[in-house]
Amino acid sequence: FPVTIVKSGNIDEIYEYIDAIRDGVLDQDTIDAGIDCEIPLDKIEEAFFGYFESDEDFAYDMAESCGYLNTKVSNRWPFTCIDWTKAARELMYDYDCSNGHYFSRNY
């Protein structure tokens, strides 16, 4: 069990945690990472954006998924950034990461 759930001593939270894992929508590592990012258990699935090796990989995937790499508009993210490290740093103002699992802060 994640330390935060055990420390809370709330048996209902422990059962919610077990149910979330048993339901199998997200794996235990993802649920634990969401808890580590202090996302309420019932919001982890909604906030989860995926698993990535680095913030830069996450930023590139986000830019690609949003279609920003196929546009010629150069005055918006990520083209306002010098490199993917800067793009990732700017993007991470709205996201949290734990063990490679990325979550939106806007859940």
Image: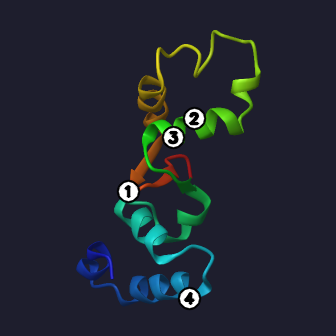
* 4 vs 2, front mark: 2
What kind of residue is marked 2?
Tyr
User: Could you tell me if the residues under marks 2 and 3 are in contact, i.e. CB atoms within 8 Å?
Assistant: yes
- Where residue 87 sits: x, y (%)? 48, 26
Using the image, tell me which numbered label, if any, was put on residue 8.
Answer: none
* 1 vs 2, front mark: 2
Q: Residues within 10 Å of mark 2 (few under 14, many from 20)?
A: some
Compared to residue 6, the image places residue 81 above or below, namely above
Sooner in the amino-acid sequence: mark 4 or mark 2: 4
Residue tagged 3: 57
Q: Residues within 10 Å of mark 3 (few under 14, many from 20)?
A: some
User: Could you tell me if the residues under marks 1 and 4 are in contact, i.e. CB atoms within 8 Å?
Assistant: no
Sooner in the amino-acid sequence: mark 4 or mark 3: 4
Using the image, tell me which numbered label, if any, was put on residue 22.
Answer: 4
Q: Residues within 10 Å of mark 4 (few under 14, many from 20)?
A: few
- Where residue 52 sits: x, y (%)? 50, 51
What whole-number distance in Å separates the C-alpha atoms at marks 4 and 3? 30 Å
Compared to residue 34, the image places residue 85 above or below, namely above
Residue tagged 2: 60
What kind of residue is marked 4?
Arg
Sooner in the amino-acid sequence: mark 1 or mark 4: 4
SS at circle 2: helix
What whole-number distance in Å separates the C-alpha atoms at marks 3 and 1? 14 Å
Q: Is residue 57 left or right of residue 37?
A: right
Residue tagged 1: 98
Sooner in the amino-acid sequence: mark 1 or mark 2: 2
Q: Residues within 10 Å of mark 1 (few under 14, many from 20)?
A: some
The quarter of the picture where residue 33 lies is: bottom left
